[in-house]
Image (cartoon, rainbow, N blue to C red):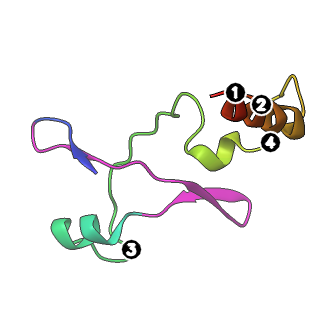
Amino acid sequence: MYNHGNNHRMAIATLRRWGRSLGVVVPREEVLRQGLREGQRVTVSVEPLAGPDDFADLCGTVSWRRSAQEYKDELRRDWEAA
């Protein structure tokens, strides 16, 4: 959650599937701060984030040129040479 000027606060949220739609969960701290209640209408501005949202999105996306064992062997050789 961060202040975007003019008391306009923004939060990064993850879209979740609700039936055939997508929904946004408003963080509890913002619900309390704004005094929001279920069924109340709010304004939402949607802008996709550029790039992965977190490290978990990167897992399995890196192509290594060598195997993990080759990297491990190289580190061991460097360690023993030092």
The amino acid on which the numbered mark 1 sits, given as a three-letter code, is Ala
Give the x, y percent position of residue 32: 21, 73
Of the residues under marks 4 and 2, which one precedes in the sequence?
4
Residue 22 belongs to magenta span: yes
Q: Nearer the viewer, residue 3 or 68?
A: 68
For label 2, count other residues whose C-alpha is less than 10 Å away and answer few (under 14), some (14-19) or many (20+).
few
Q: Residue furthest bottom?
A: 38
What is the tally of numbered marks visible in this picture? 4
Work out how far the residue at label 3 is from the one at label 2, CA to CA, in angstroms: 64 Å
For label 3, count other residues whose C-alpha is less than 10 Å away and answer few (under 14), some (14-19) or many (20+).
few
Q: Secondary structure at mark 4?
A: loop
Work out how far the residue at label 4 is from the one at label 3, CA to CA, in angstroms: 40 Å
Report which residue position mark 4 lands on. 60
Report which residue position mark 1 lands on. 81
Q: Nearer the viewer, mark 4 or mark 2?
A: 2
The amino acid on which the numbered mark 2 sits, given as a three-letter code, is Arg
Q: Nearer the viewer, mark 2 or mark 1?
A: 1
Name which residue lies at 17% across and 67% down. 33
Report which residue position mark 3 lands on. 39
Q: Nearer the viewer, residue 48 or 20?
A: 48
Q: Residue furthest front?
A: 81
Report which residue position mark 2 lands on. 77
Q: Secondary structure at mark 1?
A: helix
Q: Residue furthest top?
A: 65
Task: Please state the extent of the stretch shown in magenta in the rendering.
Answer: 6-25
Q: Secondary structure at mark 2?
A: helix
Residue 30 belongs to magenta span: no
Please indicate whether residue 65 sits to the left or right of residue 1 in the image. Answer: right
Name which residue lies at 28% across and 51% down. 1
The amino acid on which the numbered mark 4 sits, given as a three-letter code, is Gly
The amino acid on which the numbered mark 3 sits, given as a three-letter code, is Gly
Q: Is residue 61 visible?
A: no
